[in-house]
């Protein structure tokens, strides 16, 4: 049964004669990778977390002059001249060192490195940096004015509502008298 087995050799060879092994492959040079450097960011640009990722603010460059109302639903950095109100709802406005804003500003956070002429209303905080200048009234729950900043106007600290019972409602409730 096993006696008629024929040997199988590569074609063109007999009984294994002339069979050579394949040459060893040449070594592959190691890949050289350059170090990855993150893109440089402007020191004023501090991205905020939006959902699961971070996003850099929208940016208006120094070559622009804007006249009119600016509204938006994202963070904004202004480096130009703006004549008119700016409203960003629950987002941050950064007024860059070369910016000149004339108009009312409403945002969650307002950070001033440049010049603002107008009232500022921020639900979270207002910061006026070292060389920043604001002429107008401020309304916010937190404020920071650095040494060297210029400010002229009134400040109103708007407290955020605290969780818990409404004291006005409790005090206004009529008392029950028992006999």
Image: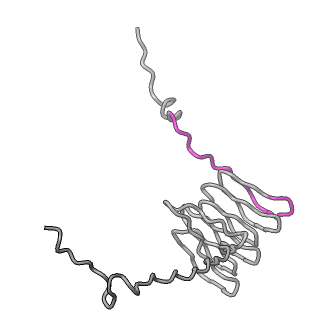
Looking at the rendering, in which quadrant would you find the C terminus? Answer: top left
Residue 174 screen position, x and y as percent: 44, 25
| Residue 110, quarter of picture | bottom right
Furthest toward the bottom, the residue is: 12
Main SS, magenta residues: loop
From this viewpoint, which residue is outermost toward the right?
148
Name the colour scheme: one colour
The total number of labels drawn is 0
Q: Residue at x 50, y 35 (%)?
A: 166
Image coords of residue 64 (percent x, y): 66, 86
Is residue 160 one of those drawn in magenta?
A: yes
Say above or below: 145 vs 176.
Answer: below
Which residue corresponds to the image point at 64% horizontal and 76% vertical from the top-left?
33
On the picture, is 110 further left or further right than 149?
left
| Rendered position, 79 above or below 90 | below
User: Which image quarter: residue 146?
Assistant: bottom right
On the image, the x and y values in percent for residue 162 come to: 56, 40
Q: In this view, does 128 lie to the left or right of 56?
A: right
Depth check: give the residue in front, 141 or 44: 44
Q: Observer-nearest residue: 20 or 155?
A: 20
Q: How far from the left and from the top, in percent, is residue 161?
A: 56, 43
Q: Is residue 159 magenta?
A: yes
The residue at the far front in this view is 3
Residue extending furthest toward the left: 1
Q: Where is the N terminus found, in terms of image quarters?
A: bottom left
Residue, x 76% and y 69% (percent of image)? Answer: 113
Q: Give the range drawn in magenta.
A: 146-164
């Amino acid at each position: 049964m096993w006696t008629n087995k024929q040997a199988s050799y590569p074609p063109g060879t007999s009984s294994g004669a002339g069979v050579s092994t394949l040459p060893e492959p040449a070594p592959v040079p190691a890949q050289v990778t350059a170090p990855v450097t993150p893109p440089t960011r402007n020191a004023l640009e501090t991205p905020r977390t939006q959902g699961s990722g971070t996003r850099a603010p929208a940016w208006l460059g120094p070559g622009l002059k804007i006249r009119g109302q600016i509204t938006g639903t994202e963070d904004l950095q202004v480096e130009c001249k703006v004549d008119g109100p700016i409203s960003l709802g629950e987002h941050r406005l950064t007024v860059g060192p070369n910016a000149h804003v004339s108009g009312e500003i409403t945002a969650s956070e307002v950070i001033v490195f440049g010049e603002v002429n107008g009232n500022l209303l921020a639900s979270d905080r207002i910061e006026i940096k070292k060389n920043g200048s604001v002429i107008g009234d401020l309304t916010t729950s937190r404020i920071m004015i650095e040494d060297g900043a210029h400010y002229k106007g009134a400040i109103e600290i708007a407290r955020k509502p605290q969780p818990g019972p409404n004291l006005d409602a409790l005090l206004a409730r009529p008392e029950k008298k028992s006999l």
